[in-house]
Image: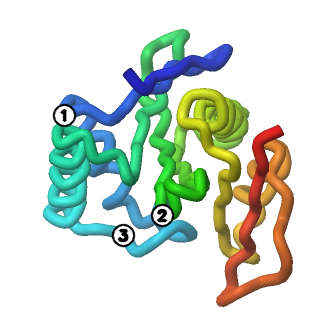
Amino acid sequence: MHEFETENLFIRLLEEKDRKHFIALYTNPKIMKNIAQTLTIQQANNMFDAILHKYLSNNYEMMIWVIYRKEDRQFSGIESLSFQSFKDKKAEAGLILDRLSHGKGTAVEALVGLIEYGFSHLNLNLIYARCGEKNYAPQRVLRRSGFTKLGSVIDGTFTYAIHKK
């Protein structure tokens, strides 16, 4: 349920066994530097518990998938879709990779897989993402994944979007 593969990646919904990886990402200041405020271990645990609780209730207002490399089954990161406007068939994409997966094409491959899954299995019409105007690597990843920049900078952030074809 709610899992998919790309050429090099296996991507599935977050499960209890992913707790340590999830917490490691959200509590690492170097990884979170350009994403959001670094969480404490307790905050990351609480967030993880809240997500799993929603899944158990079949509440998928935010879906978080873990990304594993097929070749060695190593954890690479997480990606998400947040459905602030599910009735309008729109979702915001998010992606956080562990430091060992940076610069290896994992981000683009995972995001392209997420886009395909969102359009074909979740029936979305629009997926958007935001990143800081000076955070150049995510901007390149978004462009390479098929996203187009919308408008100008708002509060230091660019918004990118991709529409279902």
The answer for how far apart the CA atoms under marks 1 and 2 are is 25 Å
The residue that label 1 is drawn on is: 16
Nearer to us in this view, 121 or 140: 121
The residue that label 3 is drawn on is: 38
| Helix, strand or loop for disc 1 | helix
Q: Where's the N terminus, which quadrant? A: top left
Where is residue 38 shown, x and y percent of the image?
A: 36, 70
Could you tell which of marks 2 and 3 lies nearer the N-terminus?
A: 3
Q: Which mark is residue 65?
A: none
The residue that label 2 is drawn on is: 84
Could you tell which of marks 1 and 2 lies nearer the N-terminus?
A: 1
The answer for how far apart the CA atoms under marks 2 and 3 are is 23 Å
Instruction: Name the residue type under label 2.
Output: Gln
Instruction: Give the class, few, some or many, for how many residues have Cα within 10 Å of label 1's Cα (few <14, many ≥20).
Output: few
- Compared with 84, 74 (above or below) is above
Nearer to us in this view, 158 or 104: 158
Please name the residue shown 69% across and 85% down the image. Answer: 156
Residue 68 lies left or right of residue 165; in this view the side is: left
Where is residue 39 shown, x and y percent of the image?
A: 29, 68
Quarter of the view holding residue 28: bottom left
Instruction: Name the residue type under label 1.
Output: Glu
Instruction: Name the residue type under label 3.
Output: Thr
